[in-house]
Image (tube, grey):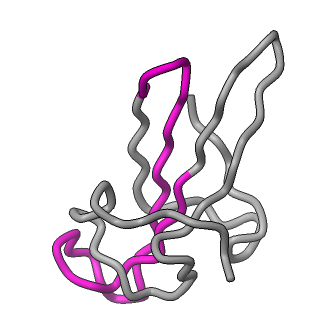
């Protein structure tokens, strides 16, 4: 399931990379990443990452938009996306 990001950068900006996973309890996790202009390596700190967490209960789906350490800067490493503490943007 691909979730189009909203209001992270330009609303029409498509992520450079995505990673979708199913987690326990019917939770769908989608990581979206945008790399800083001119950068492409996934092991360097040049990424803006957003995690969308979709939870379905009783026929309804609620999606949370979370950021690693609350940051919306291009300062994260894509390869480390699962190791960050995801919280709402501060």
Q: Is residue 72 magenta?
A: no
Task: Name the quarter where the N terminus is drawn.
Answer: top right
| Stretch of the chain drawn in magenta | 22-51
Residue 21 is situated, as x and y percent measured from the top left of the image, at 40, 32
Q: Is residue 49 magenta?
A: yes
Task: Classify 21 as above or below 78.
Answer: above
From the viewer's perspective, tell me whether residue 23 is left or right of residue 46.
right
Residue 84: give x, y in percent of width and height: 35, 66
Name the residue located 44 percent from the left edge and 86 percent from the top edge: 74
Instruction: State whether residue 83 is above or below residue 70.
Output: above
Compare residues 86 and 13 and report the one nearer the observer: 86
Q: Is residue 85 left or right of residue 72?
A: left
- Residues 58 and 17: in front is 58
What is the number of callouts on the image? 0
Q: Residue 65 sits in which quadrant?
A: bottom right
Q: Residue at x 32, y 61 (%)?
A: 81
Q: Residue at x 54, y 62 (%)?
A: 50
| Nearer-the-camera pick, 72 or 83 | 83
Main secondary structure of the magenta stretch = strand
Quadrant in which the C terminus appears: bottom right
Horizontal arrangement in the rendering, residue 71 relative to residue 41 (left or right) = right
Percent position (x, y) of residue 80?
A: 24, 64
Up/down of 22 relative to 86, above or below? above
**As displayed, is residue 19 above or below residue 11?**
above
List x then y, in percent, for residue 61: 77, 26
Farthest residue toward the top?
Answer: 58
**Residue lying at 68% horizontally and 48% vertically, measured from the top left:** 4
């Amino acid at each position: 399931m691909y979730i189009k990001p909203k209001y992270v950068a330009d609303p029409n900006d498509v992520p450079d990379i995505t990673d979708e996973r199913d987690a326990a309890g019917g939770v769908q996790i989608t990581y979206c990443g945008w790399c800083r202009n001119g950068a492409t390596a996934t092991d360097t700190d040049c990424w803006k990452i957003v995690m969308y967490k979709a939870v379905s209960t009783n026929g309804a789906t609620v999606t949370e938009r979370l950021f690693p350490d609350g940051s919306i800067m291009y300062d994260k490493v894509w390869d480390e996306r699962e190791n960050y503490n995801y919280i709402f943007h501060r």
